[in-house]
Image (spheres, rainbow, N blue to C red):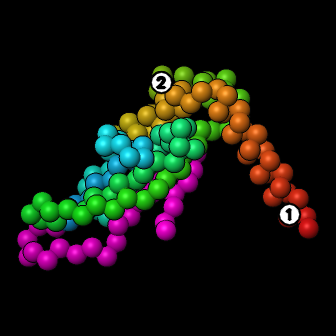
Amino acid sequence: MFFLSGTAAYTNFSVECTCWQEYEAEGGLSYEYRVRQMGRQRSLLFYFGEAASSTPTMLPVGAYSSDFLDECVLLVYDSIGDYWTLTIPVTVYPPPGPREETLDEIFQVSFGNDPSVSRRIEAGDFQGASTAMYSYVSILNVPPDFVSTINQVQCNILNVSRISSRI
C-alpha cells in the first residue's frame, strides 16, 4: 500500500495519478486531490487541474485522535463527468521543537513574512499558498501535551538510529 508521511509546515507532498486514459475523442481527464480526517466527509482541496501531478503542497496536521493519520482522496474525472475515487492514508505530524518557535513561525506566516508562501503567491499558485497557510495554522489545533510526547518519540527514534548506524 502506498503511504505518505511528513511534517506540517515542512514537508511538501506531491501526488500523481498516472496511467489513466480518456476514451472519448474530445475532452480530457481532470484531477482533484483532497485531504480529510479518516471517515469524515469534509475535506480540504489541495489540487484541481488537468495535469496528473499536483504541485508540491504542505498538508495540515493529521487528527491527533488517530495518531495524525488522515486520508488523501484522489478523484479522476473523465470528459463526461464520471469519476473514480482512490483513497490513500497520509500521516502529517506537527513539527518537532518548542511550541514557542512554532507559534513564532505561524506569526511570521500570518504577516506575509514566510518565503514559501510568498513564492507560491508570486508564481500564481494561490491554492498552494492557501494550503500552506492552513498547514501552519492547523498546528494550533494540537494540544501542547501531544507535541511534547511527539518530540520525545522523535528524539528516541533519532537516538536509536544513531546507535544502529554505529553498530
Q: Nearer the viewer, residue 69 or 129?
A: 69
**Looking at the picture, does residue 81 appear above or below residue 146?**
below
Read off the residue under disc 2: 110
Residue wearing tag 1: 164
Q: Which residues are magenta?
A: 1-28
Of the numbered discs in the image, which one, if any, rests on residue 16? none
Q: Position of residue 13 (x, y in %)?
A: 48, 53
Q: Nearer the viewer, residue 41 or 117?
A: 41
Task: For label 2, count other residues whose C-alpha is less than 10 Å away and answer few (under 14), some (14-19) or many (20+).
Answer: few
Residue 70 appearing in the image? yes
Residue 18: percent from the left, percent from the top? 34, 72
Eyeballing the image, is 7 above or below 32?
above
User: Element type at marker 2?
Assistant: helix
Report the quarter where the C terminus lies: bottom right
- Tell me the quarter of the picture where residue 139 sits: top right
Using residue 25 as the reference point, say whether residue 115 is left or right of it: right
